[in-house]
Structures are given as C-alpha cells and as structure tokens.
Amino acid sequence: MKLQSIRGMNDLLPSESPRWQYLENAVATLLARYGYSEIRFPIVESTELFKRSIGEVTDIVEKEMYTFDDRNGDPLTLRPEGTAGCVRAAIQNGLLHNQLQRLWYAGPMFRHERPQKGRLRQFHQIGVETFGMAGPEIDAELLVMTARLWRQLGIDGAVALQINSLGSAADRSRYRAALVDYLQAHHGELDEDSQRRLQSNPLRILDSKNSATQALLADAPVLSDYIDSESVDHFARLRQLLDSAGVSYQVNQRLVRGLDYYSKTVFEWVTDALGAQGTVCAGGRYDGLVEQLGGKPCPAVGLAMGVERLVLLLDELQQLPDSIARQVDIYIAAVGDVAVDGQRLAEQLRSSGDWRVQLDCAGGSFKSQLKRADRSGAVVALIIGEDEAAANSAVVKFLRSGTEQQTLAQSELSAFLTAQL
Ligand code: ATP
Ligand code: MG
C-alpha cells in the first residue's frame, strides 16, 4: 500500500511555492507599512479554547474540528482559525494591559470539510487582529489596507466588499427571538438544514443557499431594526470613513458570519471568479471575546484571508508576474577536473552581488550541464573548463537572448554581470 497524504491536506510543490511567497511577501510588506507586528502561536490548543470562543453550536465546533486526546488524556484541537489562539496568547502574555496592539500571523488551519477547489482540510490563512481600539477608525483601516493590497496585487477589479453590523450581543439575542418566531410560523417551508438550525443557530439560516428559504427570508425581520443606537452610529461612521477613502462596499443585511464572537462590524471580500468558494477575506469586530476568555474587557477587530483562494484568484486573473517562476540568475557549470574553481567562482559572485547563483554539482559533460542550466531558468551560464581554469577566466553564455557568448577574466565578471543582469 502506497503511503499518501491525508485527503484535503496538500503538498506545496517547488513549482508552486514561489506564488505563495509572492503573496506572503506582498502582505508582510504592506502590514509592516501600517505598523503591524507578527505574532506566532501554537497550532494545537486546548479544545475548550475553541468551544468557548467560536461557540458550541457553530459549524466549526459541531462538525469541523480535528479534536483528539493526547497521551495524558487532555482534549486538544488543531486550530480551525487564528483569532482564538491569538487572543489567548495576547491575554496570557500581558499584551493587552493598557496597550494598543496591531498583530498579524500566518499559517495552517484545520477543518474537516468536504475538500474541493478552494476548500481544504489543511488550509492557510494570513490573519490580522487589533486590540484596544473601540472606534470605527480601526475597522476602516483594516478595510482600506486590504483594498490597497488588492490594488497592489492587481485583483481589485475582481473582489467586492460586503459589510454589515451585528449590533451588540443583547441586540442579537432580541433579533434571534424575533427571527425564530417568524420562521417557526413557516416551519414546514424551511429546508432541512434550516429546520435544524432553527433550534441551534438560527442566524445562520440567513446564509442559506436554499431558494425557498431565501424567499421566506424576504419578509423576515431584519437585524438592522434591532441594533442599538451606539452600534448604528458606529456603523454610520465606518461607512463615512470608507466613503471618504474611496473604498466601495455593499451593505448586506444577511451577512452574519459563522462564528459567535462577532459584534458590530462584520465584512467579507468576495469574488465570483472562483465559483462557490467566493470569500477571499473575512472578519469583524469582537469586543466581547477578550473578556469571555478571561482577560479585562478589550475592544478588538480582525480579519483573515485565505491564502489558497487568493493564489487561485491571482492565477485566474493572470496577475502572477512571470519573474517569480525564475529562481536562479546565474548557473555555473564546471566541466572536467575543476570543481574547486567552480566552487570558488560561485562563492565569489555570491559575495559581490545579490544574484541567485546555482552551481552544477552533478557533473557530467558540457552538454548535460548546459541542459540543466537551461532548465534552471538562469539568464546566464558561466562555464569553466580546464583551459578557463588555467587562465582564470570563464565563458559567459546567454541562455535567454541571442547575445554572442564571450570569454572574460573571472576578475571582470562581477562588473560585467552587474551591467547585464
Ligand atoms: P466559507 O464560508 O467559505 O466556509 P468561512 O466563513 O468558514 O468561509 P472564515 O472562518 O471566515 O471562513 O475564514 C476566513 C477565510 O479563510 C475565508 O474567507 C476563506 O478565504 C478561508 N477559508 C476558510 N475555510 C477554508 C477552507 N476549508 N479551505 C480554504 N480556505 C478556507
Ligand atoms: Mg466555512
């Protein structure tokens, strides 16, 4: 029996990793420009953390978590998202005492879902969490920042922003009661999933893809009629900030998000270029969560982007620069008994420029080394045979253009390559 990876948990092959690095570098650079710092926290946490933060009756906790007992019998879970671990780490390490924080993290998340395009069991997020800022300015910053990212990546034409306000926890429970009253009266017309959710998590019914349920919802009570004046005002100010920044958005009354901890602002960046897996970035405000996990009350808002979906979108829209596929600039072929000379030249070039230099360490004929040079993607091959080694020279061969090859002294190479590459 062949050993295979777990379904929905993919290898990232060398041919694909440059695309991920391109995206990750773009995001890391952008976040640094807005003053965000990186935090890293474990992939495994106590199961209790996710139950208490995400909510017992959410899809994630009910059906999607990878949960197991370790050798001590302690219930542990592979993180299905980053916010819970980030908040736990921030409380535990005292990052929230009279301090404002702008944090980000990146890494794998695990959910037992049905694998398909853009939906995996081990997937990757880049997440951002901010702490200590109650006003809508920081909500706006997150959205303005992501809008800038989409522009930089060239995908701004393909993503649209949807926003909503969930009000406070008290507002939502009043609304939930009204919604349940209304839907209970139409119980028979609901799809099976929604009937089940009516007991466990009625707000999720607003997300239903079932058309009969959607039709029923047209006359249902709307959340915006139930939210308090402070939340209404917060949302109005957020919209004003987005308007003045030129970030366009749609208010989607049905946007509720699948996690319990949100309050006030929630948002999603969606695309229709990826089929059903259309949300590439999502987040919202969770002012109650820090206290709920044992910290002092602390307002917070964050987001997470799906790396797989963003890479798919970049690919779909042909916004991945060709240059990212090229991993080598200069390829050095040492032909004959000149290994020492090849090694020395490679090191000398790495010291004198920031080129990516690959030395052929597999030997063989001139022809086979040159074939590998071509496959490497390098722009230039430097060839040293016994004659060149004796004369301290090298043959410079251009692999991507018709430029005539030439022989140069090794001492001249650095200046020559600086001018050429
Ligand atoms: P969806 O509605 O697509 O299931 P979600 O609301 O469960 O998404 P979040 O928990 O908000 O997703 O996670 C933030 C982002 O992480 C999503 O917008 C998406 O880009 C990505 N994501 C979530 N689940 C997966 C998955 N199973 N595979 C790949 N990416 C995912
Ligand atoms: Mg989901």
Image (cartoon, rainbow, N blue to C red):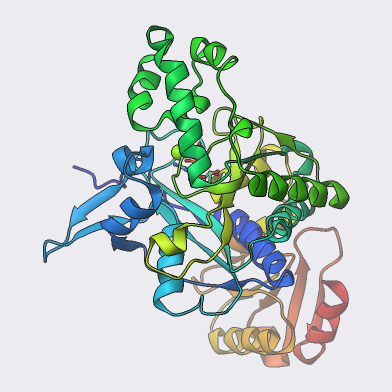
Q: x and y percent of residue 388 in the render?
A: 70, 85
Quadrant location, the N terminus: top left
- x 71%, y 76%: residue: 355
Q: Is residue 88 left or right of residue 407?
A: left
Q: Can residue 203 be seen at all in this image of the molecule? A: yes
Up the image or down, 378 lies above or below 91; here it is above
Q: Residue at x 36, y 19 (%)?
A: 195
Q: Is residue 223 left or right of residue 383?
A: left
Give left or right: position of 366 versus 329.
left
Q: Is residue 417 above or below residue 368?
A: below
- Expressed as whole percent of the image width and height from the top left, the position of residue 172 reads 50, 38
Task: Decide: is 335 above or below 165.
Answer: below
Q: Position of residue 384 (x, y in %)?
A: 66, 80
Q: In the rendering, at what x and y percent does residue 187 appear?
A: 38, 12
Above or below 263: residue 276: above
Quadrant in the picture for residue 420: bottom right
Q: Nearer the viewer, residue 417 or 403?
A: 417
Query: Quick one: quadrant of the C terminus?
Result: bottom right
Viewer-proximal residue among 187 and 45: 187
Residue 282 appears in the figure = no
Give the residue displayed 49% in from the left and 53% down from the top: 124
Count of all numbered marks drawn on residues in the image: 0
From the viewer's side, name the closer residue of 91 and 110: 91
Residue at 34 percent across and 31 percent down: it is 200
In this orientation, which residue lies closer to the viewer: 23 or 79?
79
> Furthest-left residue in view?
72
